[in-house]
Image: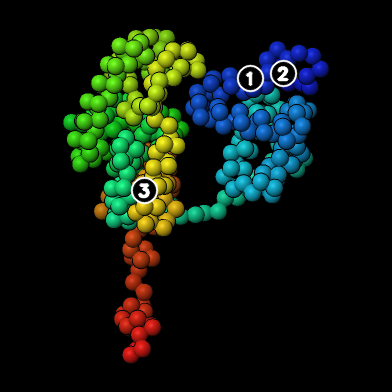
Amino acid sequence: MCAETSPPDRPPERKVLQCLADAIRARRYSPRTQETYRSWVIRYVRYHRMRHPAEMGVEEVNRFLTHLAVDQGCSASTQSQARAALLFLYRVVLGQEIEDAGRGDAVIKGKAAKRLPVVMTRQEAGRVLRRMAGIQRVVALVLYGSGLRLSEALALRVKDLDLERREIMVRAGKGGRDRVSVLPGSIVPILRDRLVERRALHEQDLARGTGWAALPGSLARKTPRAGHTFDWQFVFPASTTSPDPATGAFGRHHLHPSSVQRAVKTAARRAGVTKPVSCHTFRHSFATHLLEDGYDIRTIQELLGHRSVRTTMIYTHVLNRGGQGVRSPLDTIWSTPLDDPSA
């Protein structure tokens, strides 16, 4: 529990945000979760005009969550994310249980609408991919060919690719889980060429004293030289080197997500695809097309890294079979277009 649990009438031992960061790291949540929770706590405090969180409770939390939904127009999932961050702040960091069912107090929870994922046809996916180029195109090929999330594809290290067995090892995916996904044989030559280019770039970086990559967890302390080896380099590197926030060491991080996101949006527009295509649409299309090819739902669940098969089942509702394989009775009696004058 954070030492700063009461209104700050004297200088706190540690600030709330530092306590929040410590609590998240102790539970081994991802850096992305840490940054997300931190941003919501900052917005919450600023909304209440810099009041200390320990001075507030369920009423103030509900006012903030209502503000997000009513004034900001945030989605239910965004509101739920803010709710999770604030509950973590009070329960774990400040040691306060702000929900009391006995008193009838409760933190509001938005109900998310059930929406079907956007899925491209195979032809649409092909048209989008053909209108991409460079490293962004290779990333998109991995997204569609292996069903990876964008963050998972960009976090790939050289050692995670097994070109001989045609496997991709996804390390610490969503929920901190590892998994193995398929590596399409059609892009093995492309990835082999990419690794040749990557090795040449790494050797240039080593010669300049910047051939280092950030390492996960305590690996940097246990094996400090591992970050300079080729195996630990990111497959899709950034165009420039930068200092690591934790160590200050100069190295080459992975490609920025916005670079791929912009390229996918532009390619979809040029390909004439009117659906709202994003990087995640490739993952949805990967799963749906596997179902169309007859692969069982459990196999697809493992490839996608879903904790529950219920999450994977949503793709059974978007199969390209015309209403889950049902043939409309109209099609059995009517084959002439309704606007045909001769009908």
Say which mark, if any, is on residue 19: 1
User: Which disc is residue 267 wearing?
Assistant: 3
**Depth order, front residue of 338/85:** 338
Q: Residues within 10 Å of mark 2 (few under 14, many from 20)?
A: many
Q: Which of marks 1 and 2 is nearer the N terminus?
A: 2
Measured Cα–Cα span from mark 3 to mark 1: 44 Å
One can see residue 55 in this view: yes
Q: Of tags 3 and 1, which is closer to the observer?
A: 3
Q: Quadrant of residue 250?
A: top left
Residue at image position (31%, 30%) is: 169
Q: Quadrant of residue 305?
A: top left
> In the rendered image, which quarter contains the N terminus?
top right
Report which residue position mark 2 lands on.
Answer: 4
Q: How crowded is mark 1: few (under 14 residues within 10 Å), some or many (20 or more)?
A: many
> Earlier along the polypeptide chain: callout 2 or callout 3?
2
**Percent position of residue 303, x then y:** 33, 40
Q: Where is residue 280 in the image (x, y as percent from the top left)?
A: 41, 44
Q: Give the camera-side residue of 329 and 78.
A: 78
